[in-house]
Amino acid sequence: MHTPAPLSFATAYYPDYYPESDWARDLGRIQASGLRAVRILEFGWSWYQPTPEAFNFDAMDRFLDLCTAHGLQVVIGTPTATPPPWFFQRYPDARLVNVDGRSCFRHRHMTCWNHPAARAEAFRTVETLATRYGGHPAVWGWQIDNEPNYAEELHGYYDFNPHALADGRRWLQAKYGSLDALNAAWFTAFWSQVYTDWAQVWATHLPVAQVNPQSALDFLRWRDANMAEFVQAQAALLRHCTAGQAIGVNIPETGAVFSVPIGQDYWAQAQGLDWVGTDLYAASGKRAQDLASLAFCCDLMRSVARDASLEGARFIIAESQGGPHYRAWHTGFAPETVEPDYLRQCAGVFRAHGAEQVWWFMWRPTPAGAEIGMNAVCDLAGDPTPYTQMVAEIAAAPAQFDAALDAYAARPVALLDYSRDTLLFNYLMEGNNQSLADAQNGVHGQLDALGYRVDFINDAALEGGAIPDAACLVLAETQLLSDAAQAHVREWVEADVRRTLVLGPSVGLLNEHGHLRAPRQQPLWQWLGVTPGHLVDTDFSVAIDGATITAFRQFRLPEGAVVREATPWQGESWPLVFTLPAARVTVYAYRWGLTRAVGQSTAIPAP
């Protein structure tokens, strides 16, 4: 585990939202609270470029001078999440388009950045901004966009903009090389979908699961890669214009359910960056569950930062609630009015799981706008609250959390595979990834309870054979797995007698293109002598450890297998958990993995 720098704190502050007469007072209070930096302007495009031809940085210059005077560092956000009205007046065809041909008029992240002229306009703005402040003494770093994604819409299924589809076809040509290879990967013989011209692809037959799930899988993969390319292109531009300032991105850990429809491949977006931030809001009123969720998200995003470069990137909590909402109505977003000490609990989890900075969101709530009255450290007038005092107390003694960091870092490591391809394909086939989210969180909770430190790996680590050393590797729901990746998993566990492997019920049942495979075509199961069979998920339930499991996979076992949990079904006893001692492998047959409801199962061996 990368040793993070000493813990420090910051906040989000938006000078374009408040009277200039408040700036000096607010910055003085931020500095007095022990916060070291402010993040600004990720949504401020129209503040300094009110028209296409006019840039006016006078107010921003004055604000940065005040930050320098108060000893505060600044992180400037590039503004591409929210282009101003003049932008879409000039480029009306530069909006995302959904599968039904509807242009996107969402609140933000509504732009198709494959539109050449619109992209050039946006990059001109970023270049102008970065050139002006790339050497400013107050500017510590840059945040690319904010939470880069497709429209923040669960069922939007963007981007069918013609410019985007043209780039998508070029991506497919580079991936497959020929239409013959694409037709084979997509199994286009089914329903007479064989393509004979690249112009037909994603034009005559839409890339949706009901038409061709393999085509839709590649469409989702391309969207991920396309969004990551936009991030990387901004990073390259910022490096060209700035003088050694830290460049990063704020990627909210939106989870297995939401990250797929909005196109967020965490690992791809983070590549080559200096810091990786994430948004973590958890205030449901279920305290233990909220803190466990924060621990899961931190381990996941810390692992993303670890893999951003050979040296690893800084891991930062770029947003977390700094207090309650100031509203007169219910909200489903972090709805609980948390007590001030909850901020200390959150900071403790963040630090224990590897964060080196925490940016409280935000300093003052806004009196209007889409995020009216959203959670903040101060009240609407900018005056202190009990949360302001708590933030100051936490910032005054950051070392209080380091013992937990050291203890967690010293634990034996369990690797948990975070299979993006599985999330994409499962989303297409089921329409929702809640089952996989429950499995991921449940397995993480089991590993933590057993005393492991959890590090995540992604599909690329398995495919490339770059699996780190660890005590345990868990493939909970890695459904899509190539032969090469399966060989690398076997090589990993056989290379060291101290290593163990845990497999879920659906590992490797599909190849890398999303084709089902018979048991004899699945190298891992062939190696183990295990034959996976049918999924039993109809009118069935079994109570185990105080929870109900409603589905399991049938397995036929070889000699020497040790059954640790079993259930009767149609006159036979079927294993729910079994081990293969000679191979140091444990298999569990629950379809949904270890949900949060499942107690201390025997599916995962203790370290």
Image (tube, helix red, strand yellow):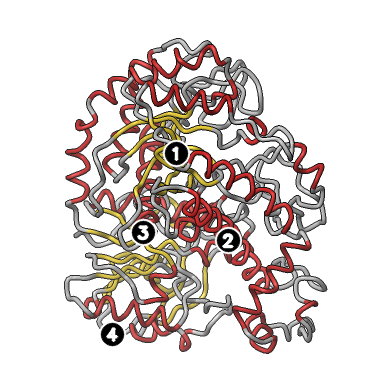
Instruction: Name the N-terminal-most of marks 4 and 2.
Output: 2
Res 603 visible: no
Residue 269 against residue 377 in the figure, above or below? below
- Rendered image: mark on residue 456: 3
Q: Residue at x 17, y 71 (%)?
A: 498
Instruction: Report the disc number at residue 559.
Output: 4
Between label 2 and label 1, give the one nearer the viewer: 2
Lower sequence index among marks 3 and 4 = 3
Q: Residues within 10 Å of mark 1 (few under 14, many from 20)?
A: many
Per the model, the C-alpha gap separating discs 3 and 4 is: 33 Å
Q: Amino acid at mark 2?
A: Asp
Q: Can you identify the residue that label 2 sits on?
A: 224
Of the residues shown, which amino acid type is indicated by label 3?
A: Phe
The residue labelled by disc 1 is 280
Q: Nearer the viewer, mark 4 or mark 2?
A: 2
State the separation of the CA atoms marked 3 and 1.
18 Å
Q: How many C-alpha atoms fall within 10 Å of the one at disc 4: few (<14), some, or many (≥20)?
A: few
- At mark 3, the secondary structure is strand
Q: Is label 3 or label 4 in front?
A: 3
Mark 3 and mark 2: span between their CA atoms?
A: 19 Å
548 relative position to 130: left or right: left
Q: The residue under label 1 is which amino acid type?
A: Leu
